[in-house]
Amino acid sequence: MKIHISDVETLVDDRIKIKVLDLSPNSKLRVSMKMELPWCTGEEFSSYGVFISNRKGEVDLDLAKPVEGTYKSADSMGLIYSLKKSKTEGKNIAENISIDEPIIMNMLFESSIERKEIELKRLFKTEDIIVKHISEEKFCGQLFYKEKSNNKTILILGGSSGDIKAMAILAAPLASRGFNVLVVPYFASEGLPDKLEKIPLEYFEKIFEWMEKNEIISTKEIFIHGTSKGGELALLLASRYKKIKKVVAVEPHAYCFQALDGMSGGKNVSSWSYKGESIPYVEVDNNIFFEEQKKAIEKGIPFGFASTYKKSIERAANKENARIEVENSEADILMISGKQDNIWNSYDGCLEILDNLKKNDYKHNVELLTYDEMGHPMPIPYIIPISETLSINMMGGVFSSGGTIGGNAEGQFKSWKRTIEFFMELLS
């Protein structure tokens, strides 16, 4: 057999094409994959697909649906997005995340008479990327850049996990495409609140000032990428600071919400503050969650937080006060949401933002990308297996972030591709 793979060494978020030739016509071909994340050896992930060659003795994985396997659609990336844990040493893949080493994926091609192995190397960053640790009196973070960048700087804001290391997974591929990328924590770091509560917006004023004056990036037009709670924050900042000119908000919401303490509700204060005062917020009633969780466990179906947020908004007496006034922004905005988001009802929130912007005759570009079978995945594709984050055993039941494995993979790839294009485009 002859195996053609478009790129055996490429960036982690790139698609590849796989085609196998010189097989017997109408014969079986089994293709399997094994992978370990470089920072978490001992945790093995596997996938496979069985295909029937055509009359020419060929199997094109972008055209051929597997007759058996871990995924069902015709897609050369199916083996990657359908990876599931096959061996474990009990390690947590969310800890000690590092972009220093590539992901190695071992592929095995087996026909009735032949077998061949191929190694894929998936890089987080190109060789010319510089990673500079920022340790200022005002803030700390990491700057990813090239000596010759395109002079566009993106500030990345993560979600409620607060893990700055995880954000490097987004920053390195973006920087590899020519952007300067700054990653900063906004809680659980020195000089900041320990939890996601009353995060001072003045903190970001210091960061913006540094971005304008820094000799490496020296930018006056700030771009922001925020995911989940980071999406809420990105839109809030854009509504208050006119220097923000582009925003990508992944799985955001239309309102400011109560503080968070891990997975549970935090103190009865806002997630955000200004001059020491809570910014108006919607209280999140966890009693709704516990009631619906109990019903879901009794029915044997997954549970999540989306309905808790939806009902909390419906009950709120201060909705308009807590709404993020995105219409006050002067930024081009790209919002991304899955219709099956089960962490919170971001799709409803995005529709509400879009409606308010239209009512206010918003003068800048606005775009909403939605995906029918996407839930609340990471914004970048093909790195952390979706099976690891889609469903988690919790509290006697199954917690789901929403959507299907295939639907999340499709939404991740298409929205990430559009994100890169959006940041590349000229301002409106």
Image (spheres, helix red, strand yellow):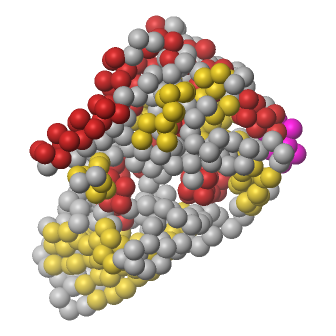
The answer to whether residue 35 of the structure is visible from this angle is: no
Q: Is 188 above or below relative to 283?
A: below
Give the residue at x 23% y 35%: 291
Give the residue at x 33% y 78%: 87
Relative depth, front residue between 115 and 300: 300
Residue 418: x and y in percent read 49, 41
Asked whether, in this view, residue 207 is left or right of residue 196, the answer is right
Quadrant in which the N terminus appears: bottom left
Residue 142: x and y in percent read 71, 53
Q: Is 103 above or below relative to 71?
A: below
Residue 159: x and y in percent read 52, 43
The answer to whether residue 112 of the structure is visible from this angle is: yes
Residue 300: x and y in percent read 14, 49
Q: Is residue 220 magenta?
A: no
Asked whether, in this view, residue 303 is left or right of residue 151, the answer is left
Q: Give the residues drawn in magenta, as a range.
A: 211-217
Give the residue at x 51% y 33%: 267
Relative depth, front residue between 150 and 34: 34
Quadrant in which the C terminus appears: top right
**Quadrant of residue 82 within the rendered picture:** bottom left
Relative depth, front residue between 176 and 57: 176
Give the residue at x 46% y 7%: 359
Report the number of discs. Answer: 0
